[in-house]
Image: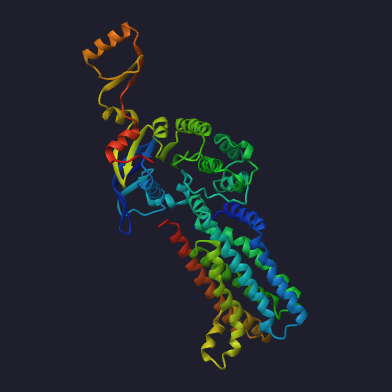
Amino acid sequence: MNVSVKRMRAIFIKDYKEFSRNYAISTMVLMPLVLALFYQNAGAASLDLYFLPVNMTFAFVTTFIQACLIAEEKESNTLRSLMMSPASMADILIGKSTLVFSITIVIVTLTIMILGFTPANLFILAAGLTISTVFYIGLGIICGLFTKTVMEASVAILPVMAIFSLGPLAMGLAETYSVLEVLKWLPSSQLIMLEGYSAAGNITDIIISLAVIAGWTVITLVIASMLFKKRLKDE
Amino acid sequence: MTAEINVEHLGKKFNEFIALEDVNFSVHKGEIFGLLGPSGSGKTTLIKVLTAQLDQNKGKASVFGMPVNEMKRVENKSRFGLLTDNSGLYKRLSVEENLMLYKDLYGLDDSAIDEALAFVNLQDARKKKVSKLSKGMLQRVTLARALMHNPDLLFLDEPTSALDPGNTHHIYKGLRKLNEMGTTIFLTTHDMAEAETLCDRVAFLHEGKIQAIGAPSELRLRHSDQSMIVELTNGEQHTLPLNELTTAERLEEWMRHQLIQRIWSNEPTLGDIFMEMTGRDLR
């Protein structure tokens, strides 16, 4: 794999400049913070509710912004110019993901701080959040590469937002509708369960939860890479 | 002579539409080669095949002696530059910021930006936001980006289509200089004047097929009816065959009486030849 830190840095700096001047997208980072403030005042009673703003950060910030950044590059034909430059697939994808990764980490940390949530084990939660961030970035890349315009991308990620942010809440209905049991395997559900297992000190379940999130991440990244390679051709 | 580009029996189809059919030609190292054809004739498709953006369905194509698929490799991408009709510039960034990105991607010095901007005569627009540029300026920035890394081979798709005569002349001069320094240039155009001014050899592409290849002067000569036109002071025009004694006698007669106003060759233009061969205009 041909990777250059200099090329990734160049793409990251360019994305940062573009992002900071694109208010329609950059203001999205405020949404989870507003939600967290609301929850702080209302008081969150369960882990599910504590993690709702966190999972929403992943959907509204990580996936949405990543999808829009990629879709905009496609829409304005700049992605093709990047592909024709010496930047490799890894340079482009990692360079373009670094900005969203950094923003996500900051917003998730702020959200947790505003909520006043104290994790049972900071290291385990940090691991879960980091892997989840990569997963949602991959999801954003897929949405961005599948769509042709920013407008299409913002519509395409709506089901993603609904399934991954609100999926864990729907698990409460699993006793009535057993089919909803499947939702516990969502990475967003596993993140909440990870915190529960961490509090209980259940090592096996912690590993299983982290492995499930990592599994989703690997599958997403493989699909994103395949789609990117397909987009190298202008068929 | 080494072939920088070699194309043999190339074919490309989009579903049932045949975009390129049995295309054969070579571009020699250090040459300026022009592909002339009207819109929709397959010029852009051919550039996309040669830069590995599209796969051909038939035949073979090689660039730098390697199959075109090798052009996707990072080390080969630095060897060519590409200007397309879609600018692919970041509209929220300035001209300099756009070029800065590519300067870093190609691993160049800061001076590469100054040189590229001077080449396209855009030093004054350095800090201008791309969204504020005119169509011609956008084309010049894209050209600056395509050649800032001094590629061995430059693909230019309609390089001056949006430029005014002054800037077109400036770009022609620059391209000639670049060519003298060793860059092979492959350009597509439907502007016959551009082809005649710039190209060492041209190929006519019509409905995906190459109709003729040769140096512009050679093609004109090949299709010339070997005659000249003489305009007299009274406005009369006479078409006279070349290399015939009767012509010399008539010219002598008119000259003696100081009746000749203008004489010009009756050679066809590249546009005339294209029209004669395909039955349609280059535009």
Query: Is B174 displayed left or right of B188 in the figure?
Result: right
Report if residue B1 is visible in the image. no
Give the mark count: 0
Examine the image and state in which quarter residue B199 appears.
top left
Taking the view exactly as shown, the residue that stands out farthest to the front is: B234
Report if residue B225 is visible in the image. yes
> Residue A168's spot in the image, x, y percent?
60, 82
Q: Nearer the viewer, residue B263 or A153?
A: B263
Position of B35 relative to A111 (above/below): above
Q: Nearer the viewer, residue A154 or B3?
A: A154
> Residue B242's spot in the image, x, y percent?
25, 19
Residue positioned 33% across, 28% down in the render: B217
> Residue B197's spot in the image, x, y percent?
42, 30
Query: Is A106 displayed left or right of B54 in the figure?
Result: right
Position of B27 relative to B89 (above/below): above
Residue positioned 27% across, 27% down in the render: B224
Examine the image and state in which quarter residue B38 appears.
top left
Query: Is B264 displayed left or right of B156 in the figure?
Result: left
Q: Quadrant of the C terminus of chain A?
A: bottom left
Taking the view exactly as shown, the residue that stands out farthest to the left is: B245
